[in-house]
Amino acid sequence: MRLLIGSLFAFAVAALVGLGSTYFALSRGAAFGSLTIGSWTAWPKSGTSDADPYARATIARTGQLPMALGDGVSFSARADDQGRALDGRCDVVVSGVTPAARFWTLTLYNTAGELVANSVGRYGFTSEEIVRSADGSFAITVAPRANPGNWLPTGGVERYGLVLRFYDTAIGVATRASREVPMPAIKTRNCP
Amino acid sequence: MMRWLLLLLGGALLGGIVHLATVMALPRTATHDAYSRLAAGAPVNTVVALQPPTPDNAPMPLMDPAFVSAVCRYDLSAGPLKLTVPVGPAYTSVSFYTRFDVAYYAINDRAAGRRIIELDLMTAEQHNQMPEDVDVTAADRLIVESPSTTGLIAIRALAPEPGLMPMARASLASARCEREDVPKTAK
């Protein structure tokens, strides 16, 4: 009897620890080889056949097709430069310059990876659509209400993520965070 | 007390094995991965245009709304495939995925260097069986080796501004992925 209760207890612990850690690892995106620059994180290796088991499991679980490294690299951000989670009710400014790439796109998704409905039907920007200042830098205002300049509507959702994709770029598995890879800053302004 | 601590430790160790086993097994058991989602609406060895993602409906999560996409779900068991993709207005890429959604190769319009991306997709075995002279005469022929017999090709064309969407869509509409018309010699 003692043996039975003991082994049941051990199995319960095993299931809790095993499944819990799997769930936790996959919902946090725990693949190896991440490249973090400022608030932006990319997993260049997930887009190659060297993708590790965690990357493969995350890809299978979310149902996305990862961006192949020969195509480009996708950076995502869920928080601003202060570490504060991106809030769709605040005005968030994404500004600066981007690393060299033939094209880039910035897209806003909700936490499930879906586009967010808004009154103007704008879900993101491409590098060609952006209004830039004289020195080539840009500022995009991610806000619930219309703003002058580059306005990316949030639809007022509570949490969202930004995905910045670089197409035909030299950023890859060997890239390290440095001055050669300047990423735009993310700052939260007025919050109600 | 000691006995419970030992059981807890044993359970935690076993939990580590459960963790590794579930992570490794997940791609093979997932029913909502990209390949399974697309399998229903995409016949084998045909280019199928995907609906542009909208807030209510998207073929897959995290699709780039600035792109027009099409997929070709391939099965090489009957022989190699020929893929032809005309280049769109700005940027066109072709990415290859295995059955378990691992990207193993991608090429874009600039790397292809022509107004049309043309390549042959085959398994390593089919590549080895190819007569040598064919390989030599068609030096500019691009051959991609697929690590698996089945998989997915994602063809995407960028519309840098919304006005160029119809142009990008038109260029993908004439993309083809099909069996090579020359029947393979029996071996």
Image: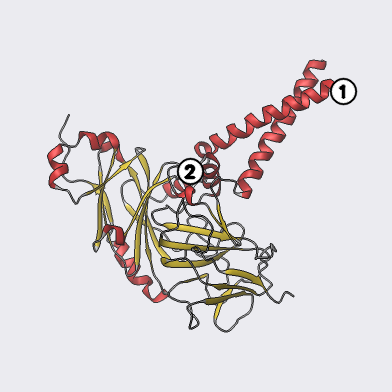
**B132 on left or right of B62:** left
Tell me the SS state at disc 2: loop
Eyeballing the image, is B111 above or below B131? below
Q: Amino acid at mark 2?
A: Ala
Residue A173 in the image: state x and y as whole percent.
Answer: 46, 50
In depth, the one of A79 and A170 nearer the eye is A170
- On the question of residue B12 being in view, the answer is yes
> Does residue B34 sit above or below A99 in this rendering?
above
User: Are the residues tagged 1 and 2 within 8 Å (C-beta)?
Assistant: no
Query: Which residue lies at the image location 57% right of the left edge and 84% below the top edge?
Result: A148
User: Residue visible at 59% across and 74% down?
Assistant: A153
Question: Could you say where residue B45 lies in the image, as x and y percent from the top left?
Answer: 31, 47
Pinpoint residue A104: horizontal percent, then vertical percent: 45, 67
Q: Amino acid at mark 1?
A: Met
Q: Which residue is mark 1?
A: B1
The disc at residue B30 is none
Secondary structure of the residue carrying numbered label 1: loop
Real-space Cα distance between discs 1 and 2?
Answer: 44 Å
Above/below status of A140 relative to A71: below
- Asked which colour scheme the image uses, the reply is secondary structure
Image quadrant in which the C terminus of chain B is located:
top left
Residue most extreme to the front: A179
> Which of the 4 quarters of the picture holds residue A17?
top right
Q: Quadrant of the N terminus of chain B?
A: top right
Hey, which residue is sitting farthest right in the picture?
B1
B29 over A126 or under it: above or below:
above
Q: Quadrant of residue B128?
A: top left
Q: Does the image show residue B66?
A: no
To which residue does mark 2 refer? A51
- Horizontal and vertical percent for residue A129? 45, 76
The residue positioned 37% from the left and 73% from the top of the image is: B164
Chain containing the residue with disc 1: B
